[in-house]
């Protein structure tokens, strides 16, 4: 039935339902749409039949329980238009909605963000959000297995947490090697200036050139940012790796580390290009132009290879405050 429905426009389906308001059909569509995260269809359906909002399926789950199980924040956010008066109810296994948030979802839903560490962060965000909807008694309530939501979350996410720690450490270690190489190169470049130094005064021969200023400044920036990147990645390697470290501390450190590493690579290549403009500005001008063009390739390559990871870190860390809030008022 759902296969036929998704081939039709939402408006046509809603007209068919309005012409034959069978409650069983409405409920079937309701829970199927919630399971697939069809937010727009749900909104229109609930506007037509608001009385089915708190209906339950065979597992005693409302659409909001289904949304939590399948990690559909758009469907879950409809809760802000109805309140949370029945979320404390339990299903056949004694699980309330916080227990459901503690259960790890399918791998498909986990893969909406890249990397086990960021997946762990997203899971913590869900657990933290749902936790705010229940009182202190329901937060500690045990299911039929004798586990409260926190215990269930720890058990369900133990392997994901291990993968997150391993992924974070491997990423930090690899980036730290690159940052250390850049720091070594830029430190050495600071004492081997292009054109050499005046034997009498000790001043750089080409110090009056604008390209020399660019070289010195960018080399210093590259050295400082690569050193900062090393310290940040070292902090990641020596972190305690508790559950809540994945919520903000580790992702922020990873973001800062990647950003400073990118800046150090970019400024190192600028300094490298500036040295060629110093040495070949008067003769063979095509050489520094060619070198400057080629020097942009590592910067572009780094950005292209890591933009998805960097975007996911920013999105899950700083956009998380808007993840569980409706963008506009939907009902009323």
Image (cartoon, grey):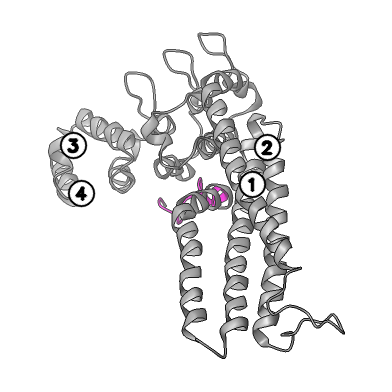
The residue that label 1 is drawn on is 176
Residue at 50% x, 28% y: name it: 101
Q: How packed is label 4: few (under 14 Cα within 10 Å), some, or many (20 or more)?
A: some
Mark closest to the chain's N terminus, 2 or 1: 1
Q: Residue at x 53, y 24 (%)?
A: 157
First in sequence, mark 1 or 4: give its number.
4
Q: In the rendering, which numbered label is found on residue 237?
A: 2
Which quarter of the picture shows residue 218?
bottom right
Crowding at mark 3 (Cα within 10 Å: few <14, some 14-19, many 20+):
some
The residue that mark 3 highlights is 21
Q: Secondary structure at mark 1?
A: helix
Tell which circle, 1 or 3, labels the residue nearer the N-terminal end.
3
- In space, the residues marked 3 and 4 are separated at their CA atoms by 16 Å
| Secondary structure type for disc 4 | helix
Pointers 2 and 1 in contact (CB under 8 A)? yes
* Secondary element at tag 2: helix
């Amino acid at each position: 039935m759902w296969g036929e429905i998704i081939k039709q426009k939402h408006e046509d389906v809603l007209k068919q339902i309005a012409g034959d308001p069978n409650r069983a059909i409405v409920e079937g569509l309701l829970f199927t749409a919630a399971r697939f995260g069809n937010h727009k269809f749900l909104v229109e359906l609930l506007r037509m039949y608001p009385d089915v909002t708190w209906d339950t399926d065979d597992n005693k789950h409302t659409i909001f329980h289904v949304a939590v199980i399948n990690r559909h924040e758009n469907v879950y956010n409809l809760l802000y238009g109805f309140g949370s008066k029945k979320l404390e109810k339990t299903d056949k296994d004694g699980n309330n909605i916080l227990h459901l948030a503690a259960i790890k979802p399918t791998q498909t839903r986990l893969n909406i963000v890249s990397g086990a560490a960021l997946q762990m962060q997203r899971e913590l965000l869900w657990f933290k959000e749902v936790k705010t909807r229940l009182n202190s008694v329901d937060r500690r309530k045990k299911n039929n297995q004798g586990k409260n939501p926190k215990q269930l979350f720890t058990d369900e996410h133990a392997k994901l947490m291990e993968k997150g720690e391993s992924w974070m450490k491997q990423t930090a270690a690899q980036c730290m090697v690159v940052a250390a190489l850049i720091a070594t190169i830029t430190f050495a470049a600071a004492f081997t200036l292009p054109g050499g130094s005046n034997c009498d005064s000790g001043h750089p021969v080409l110090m009056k050139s604008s390209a020399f200023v660019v070289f010195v400044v960018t080399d210093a920036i590259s050295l400082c940012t690569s050193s900062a990147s090393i310290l940040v990645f070292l902090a990641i390697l020596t972190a305690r790796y508790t559950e809540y470290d994945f919520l903000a501390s580790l992702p922020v450190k990873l973001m800062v580390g990647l950003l400073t590493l990118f800046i150090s690579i970019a400024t190192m290549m600028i300094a490298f290009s500036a040295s060629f403009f110093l040495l070949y500005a008067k003769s063979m001008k095509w050489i520094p132009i060619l070198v400057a063009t080629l020097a942009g390739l590592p910067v572009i390559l780094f950005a292209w290879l890591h933009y998805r990871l960097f975007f996911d870190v920013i999105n899950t860390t700083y956009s998380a405050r808007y993840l569980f809030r409706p963008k506009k008022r939907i009902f009323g």
